[in-house]
Amino acid sequence: MLLISQIMQDAQQDIARANAQGKGFAARLTITRKASHNLKAPAENIWSLGNEFVSQLHQIDPGFRAIIEQASIEAGDHPESQANVCSFFQKIRELSDAAHRGLESLQRMIDVSSPLEAMSRDLRRPVRRLRQGLTLMVEAREVIDEWVKMIEDTSIDCDEFAGTSSP
């Protein structure tokens, strides 16, 4: 992400410099082609990682759903296990919070990248690929949010265990 940001900043600065020197359209075209070339590998990497992330999340989703459901039953049947269940539930909530914080910047990058596709035909493919990969990661957050909703729908009251961790 930092590399992509740097490539875009460099291109923006180069265009500003070219405009100030009166170099015109040909210079802007050369700069956008260079930026497009430099964006290809990182954009493909983001797309690949986004696919891998979503795929892995979908693979573990049924297991997490079963664990949440079973943990809820366990805590109801065996109150002594409630602290462990609440600790597990808290870890899922922390994962969700971290996903929201981390993916907020990705959402902003998606919003910013969309207009770039229209700027230059050369930029269209790498920016589209980048946006697709980022969108996959942001959408994966919804799976984690569903786990939190499942936890909230349980009858387990973890308030007394908040801020504590189990052995």
Image (tube, helix red, strand yellow):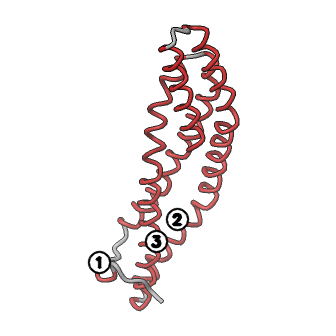
Label 3: few (<14), some (14–19) or many (≥20) C-alpha neighbours in 10 Å: few
| Between discs 2 and 3, the one toward the N terminus | 2
Q: Which amino acid type is marked by label 2?
A: Arg
Residue 31, percent from left and from top: 61, 20
Which mark, by number, is residue 159? 1
Name the element at disc 2: helix
- Labels 2, 1: front one: 1
- Eyeballing the image, is 77 above or below 37? below
Mark 2 to mark 1: distance in Å? 22 Å
| Of 141 and 130, the residue lying toward us | 130
- Report the residue that reaches farthest toward the front: 21
| Of 111 and 54, the residue lying toward us | 111
| Between discs 2 and 1, the one toward the N terminus | 2
Q: Residue at x 59, y 29 (%)?
A: 127
Q: Which amino acid type is marked by label 1?
A: Asp
Task: Identify the residue under disc 3.
Answer: 91
Which mark, by number, is residue 65? 2
Residue 46, percent from left and from top: 63, 42
